[in-house]
Each structure stands twice: as structure tokens, then as C-alpha cells.
Image (cartoon, rainbow, N blue to C red):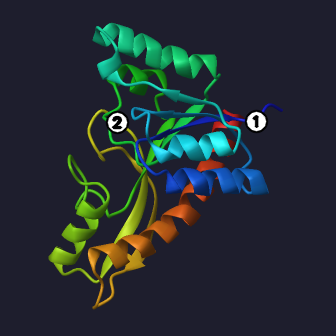
Amino acid sequence: MKKMQLAVFVSGGGSNLQAIIDAASSGKLDLDIALVLSNNANAYGLERARNSGIPTAVVNSKDFDSREEFIRAFLGTLEAHDVDFIALAGYLRKIPPELIQRFDGRIVNIHPGALPEFGGKGMFGIHVHEAVIESGRDNTAVTVHFVTEEYDEGAVIAVREVPVLPDDTPETLQARVLEVEHALYPEVLQSLAEKLRSQ
């Protein structure tokens, strides 16, 4: 049986992408990473993909004369690589509705905080950890959820709690949360691939 074909979207360093690549190469993740796509030609995540022999693409709305051309190129790139489903891994652009409709129930994101409390526009990366520490909570969470047309509002697939320590800074909390992200995301993608394959 043909393996599920995953596209990973990145905008920056792509540490979660690396965790997915490592899980796939070790056999823990039974799928093919068909494409790594970015809106940023300088994203280090693209370098990670090239180092592993994974096809890459850059699709940025600013490079097109019209929104229609952008959407056509975006969808065309995914179709050319026979993509079955999509994982966002630090992708900092809103997913166009046309993509969400085409891949309904097949686009997931990992968020470094509890949702909905620490989600929404502008809540990414270190901003989430700053907000968690300011809130005084003694725990945070990694959340994997389906992507919809609104930021961080899709159905939650998995949550894993992470303690906030008394002497945590946003940076130390971020490092500990990332370790949990790197373990959880491949597990969730494996489960999703199995479900999609059986449909």
C-alpha cells in the first residue's frame, strides 16, 4: 500500500520539521514527506529538507501579480507532489480558505500553549511563553489541532501538559516545551496517517 504523502509548511528554523524527518527515517512515522513548503526562501527549514533529500518549494503571495495566481500556484505545487495531508511546523502565514477547503480535515498545526487561552493572532513562539509566565499558571501545554480559517480555533487532536517551574524564563520554558513538541507531533501524525489511510 502506498504511503501517505505529507507536506510540511515552515517559515523559520523548522525544529519540528527535523523531529518529523527523524521519526520518518527511523521508521516511527510510516509516511513519506513529499514536500517542505515555505513562504520564506531563507527559512532554515528548507535547508533541513534539502539535507534529507526532500523536495522543497517557496510559495509567497508577494511573488504573484494576483491572489488567483498565488492560490493556483499553491494548490498546483501540492498537487504536483501528490500531497495527502499537511502539517504546519512554525508556518507564520494564515492558510488560504481555498487550501482549507481542498484539504478539509487534513491540515494540522502544533501550538506551544494551551488553546484557546494562549492562541490567536500574534500568539506564536516566545510570545506564547511570555504570556504563560505572566499569567502565573503552574502548567502549560502543547496542543495539536486541525487548521480552520481562524487562527488556533480548529478541533483539538492532542494535548500534552508541561509544568511551568518557579524560576522559568520564557526561554527556558520554550526549550522544555519544544522537547515535548518534538515527541508529540510525530505520534499524532502517525495516528492521523493511519486514520486517513483507512478512509
Residue topped by disc 2: 148
Distance of label 1 from label 2 (alpha carbons): 25 Å
Q: Using the rendered view, name the quadrant where residue 39 is placed.
A: top left
Label 2 is placed on what type of residue?
Answer: Thr
**Left or right side of 113 for 21:** right
Identify which residue is drawn at 38% across, 47% down.
155
Task: Looking at the image, tell me whether mark 1 or mark 2 is earlier in sequence order.
Answer: 1
**Left or right side of 134 for 186:** right
Give the x, y percent position of residue 195.
64, 42
Taking the view exactly as shown, the residue that stands out farthest to the right is: 1
Label 1 is placed on what type of residue?
Answer: Lys
Q: Quarter holding the C terminus? A: top right
Secondary structure under badge 1?
loop
Q: Closer to the camera: disc 1 or disc 2? A: 1
Residue topped by disc 1: 3
The local crowd at label 2, few if under 14, some if 14 to 19, many if 20 or more residues have their Cα within 10 Å, is many
Give the x, y percent position of residue 66.
28, 8
Q: Is residue 17 above or below residue 62?
A: below
Q: Nearer the viewer, residue 2 or 131?
A: 131
Q: Nearer the viewer, residue 26 or 192?
A: 26
Q: Is residue 54 above or below residue 184?
A: above
Secondary structure under badge 2?
loop
Q: Is residue 61 above or below residue 5?
A: above
Give the x, y percent position of residue 142.
41, 64
